[in-house]
Amino acid sequence: MQTPFHFHAGTVPLLISMPHAGTAIPADIAAQMLPVAQEKADTDWHMPALYNMAQELGASTIVADYSRYVIDLNRAPDNANLYPGQDTTGLCPIDTFAKQPLYAADKLPSDAEIQNRITLYWQPYHQQLQYELTRLLELHGSVVLWDAHSIASHVPRFFQGKLPDLNFGTADQKSCDPGLQKALLDCLAASPESQHYSHVFNGRFKGGYITRQYGQPQRHVHAVQLEMSQCIYMNETSPFAYRPDLAQQVQPLLKQCLESCLTWVRQQGTQA
């Protein structure tokens, strides 16, 4: 079986997680699915390319290999709704963001199949994520988990109108110390590049399972999710091409945000 993720161990107190960047669908699962699944439209496309500064910064990275259509690594294993009362896709999605069915009605994944996917794909990713957070915490005394995401700028199923360019989530400041959120706000206020992009904290996206589960500021683990609007770095229609001309404009700001996290967390580490 193909490894469920690619991992790089860094040297600084920063772990960048990309749980929705994968595109692989195992043949046996693909055989159950309708043709629309092969378009993989709801992928967080090109995340490793967009975050090409990660290794230069010394960050650890973990990138999913399998599509969120196989299993959503940013959902709870019991499939609890992240946003009660709002429409969301589940642990093993049965439709696309555009509400197109992924399976024929008689081929939906069974409970046993879902449990098998949890064992094969979900658990290894989360075990590696936990291991690396523990390692970095022991080394540095404090660590930032940055959960990297992107989504089409218009998805009527989930939000009205156009999404802001940069959507930061800190679970309403529960997944990180308020000082880290302030450091990011200060970075955005000071950066000339930020004037070209709209941003919001804890708007439509407050952080998914990973941010909420592992962000434990009382243990010196501080989690932030960034949901980027895809129109600022790629084409939003198939074949979803990467746009280096656009990406190069936002990457300096992205790097500044990561650097501000590192500056802040290193200060915490010396105090821990």
Image (cartoon, rainbow, N blue to C red):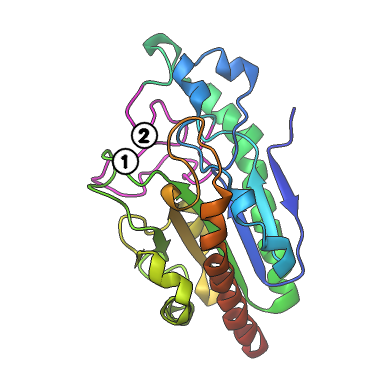
Q: Quadrant of the C terminus?
A: bottom right
Most common secondary structure along the magenta stretch: loop
- Residue in front for this viewpoint, 120 or 247: 247
Please provide percent x and percent y for residue 22.
Answer: 60, 38
Kindly report which numbered mark, 2 or 1, lies closer to the viewer in this rendering. Answer: 1
Task: Assess whether mark 1 and mark 2 are in contact (beta carbons under 8 angstroms).
Answer: yes
User: Quadrant of the rendered structure where residue 266 is?
Assistant: bottom right
Q: Which residues are magenta?
A: 71-100
Three-letter code, disc 2: Phe
Please provide percent x and percent y for residue 180.
Answer: 49, 78
Give the answer, above or below, for where 269 lies relative to 199.
Answer: below
User: Quadrant of the rendered structure where residue 16 is?
Assistant: bottom right
Give the answer, above or below, for where 176 lies relative to 126.
Answer: below
User: Quadrant of the rendered structure where residue 201 is?
Assistant: bottom left
- Name the secondary structure under disc 1: loop
- Residue in front for this viewpoint, 156 or 104: 156
Disc 2 target residue:
97
Q: Residue at x 23, y 48 (%)?
A: 161
**As drawn, is 202 to the left or to the right of 264?**
left
Three-letter code, disc 1: Val
Measure how far apart labels 2 and 1 are at the Cα level.
7 Å
Mark before the other along the chain sequence, 2 or 1: 2
Decide if residue 220 is in sight here. Answer: no
Q: Quadrant of the N terminus?
A: top right
Disc 1 target residue:
155
Mark 1 closeness class: few <14, some 14–19, many ≥20 residues within 10 Å: some
Q: Residue at x 56, y 62 (%)?
A: 251
Quick one: which residue is furthest to the bottom in this view?
A: 271
The disc placed on residue 245 is none
Please provide percent x and percent y for residue 131.
Answer: 70, 57
**As drawn, is 206 to the left or to the right of 22?**
left
